[in-house]
Amino acid sequence: MSEFEAPFPEGVTEPEYELYGRGEHAVDVDPARVFADLSPEDAAYRERARTFALDEVAPVIDDYWDRADYPLQLVKRLGELDLLRDGVQMPGRPEQSRLAAGLVNAELSRVDGSVGTILGVQGGLALRSIMDCGSPEQIERWAGRMADGTLPGAFALTEPTHGSDSVGLQTSATKVEGGWVLNGEKKWIGNGSLGPALGLEALSVVWARDGEGQVRGFAVPQDSEGYSAQTITGKLALRAIWQAHITLRNVFVPDENLLPGANSFKDTSAVLFSTRLSVAWGAVGAAMGAYETAVAYARQREQFGRPLGANQIVNERLARMQSELVQVQLLARHCVALEDKGELTGAQASLAKFTATRTARSIAANARDLLGGNGILVRNRAARIFADVEALHTYEGTETVQALLIGRSITGHSTFTG
């Protein structure tokens, strides 16, 4: 022990901040009561998703995100809790309304965008493709296990040279005796490398052009000969879900794996249209999480001898964030009501996605800034949300593409072609 001793100064050690809105630090993320009148069934789905996200995702997700690892056990738990369907109706399972599906997505994304994206890939795209385009035999074979989270599913549409221009896809499907031969590449395919990387049974719904130029859908086991997938590394967003660069070299797919309801790009677009609002709901959830983090921090962090939230400029910024949050909550719920009535247009779905992701970006950036230096630490949520929203803003149609779709509905002129 040193012969020199002096008292350790009080107030030097930083406290642990509770930024997930638990207990006494709870934050009201529905200040305008947009969701105050939920049915008991919808409220139960939301509460189940919220409990799972707080109790099982929040304690581990920082580590998975930091290591860019895939939380496979969380996917299985999502299936066990019936939170993996994204509103896809299935025989023998309880009805899940579109609003319930949106709220589940929002609550998962409120805690982590990677887990919200896993839901969108597994349930919104892969499972929906099987249910909407598959035969009764295919549905019986694959759909239940996808919903249970025991059969990972991927939706392989985007190509290295065709991102926003997905309609221009060039992967080919050549008819041969007893089936089809697929050749081409796909990129940014969520869950597309789980089978090869982890030795699991996994299925990719691959979209390819046949000899007549029509886009067809194929259920391709990821252990098929000629199917190779590399997990894309070096990502700065959505690090806890693996996206793959897939190469298909003379992959034989038997006729029984051709999806009979997928015969043109219109069928592909129908699946995508059904998930566009899901992306908006994911953005609503990210906005809720960022707002919640900022408010909780402003209440607990002390600077200049008082809580951060005791400053006028902080109150003004939080008020602005709250205003933006309520706007996208109202828009998302209204668009679900339109969809329930069969009245939602493509332009309106694009407007929801465009507005929600732009708003989530704004709220996340503000939250990151309000946390100061602490805002760049993964464990403090803001930086992770800030990064993940960048990916959300891009996939399922970039901001620019959505703007062109909205603009076409305004002017009547398409600017996608000269």
Image (cartoon, rainbow, N blue to C red):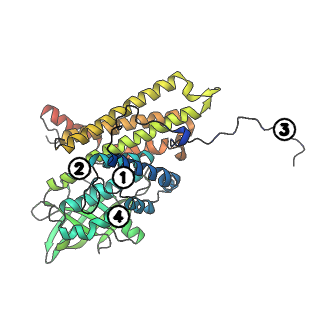
Badge 3 is on which residue?
6
Dot 2 or dot 3: first in sequence order is: 3
Badge 1 is on which residue?
117
Q: How far apart, in angstroms, are the residues tagged by discs 1 and 4? A: 17 Å
Q: How far apart, in angstroms, are the residues tagged by discs 2 and 4? A: 21 Å
User: Disc 2 or disc 1, which is closer to the eye?
Assistant: 2
Dot 3 or dot 4: first in sequence order is: 3
> In the image, what residue type sits under mark 4?
Asp
Badge 4 is on which residue?
148
User: Disc 1 or disc 4, which is closer to the eye?
Assistant: 4
> In the image, what residue type sits under mark 1?
Thr
Badge 2 is on which residue?
274
Mark sitting on residue 131: none
Q: Quadrant of the C terminus?
A: top left
Horizontally, residue 291 falls left or right of residue 223, namely right
User: Disc 2 or disc 4, which is closer to the eye?
Assistant: 4
Viewer-closest of 164 and 289: 289
Q: How far apart, in angstroms, are the residues tagged by discs 3 and 4? A: 60 Å
Residue 216, horizontal then vertical, whole percent: 16, 62
Residue 200, horizontal then vertical, whole percent: 38, 71
> In the image, what residue type sits under mark 2?
Ser
Q: Is residue 139 above or below residue 351?
A: below
User: Disc 3 or disc 4, which is closer to the eye?
Assistant: 4
Counting every numbered tag in the picture gives 4
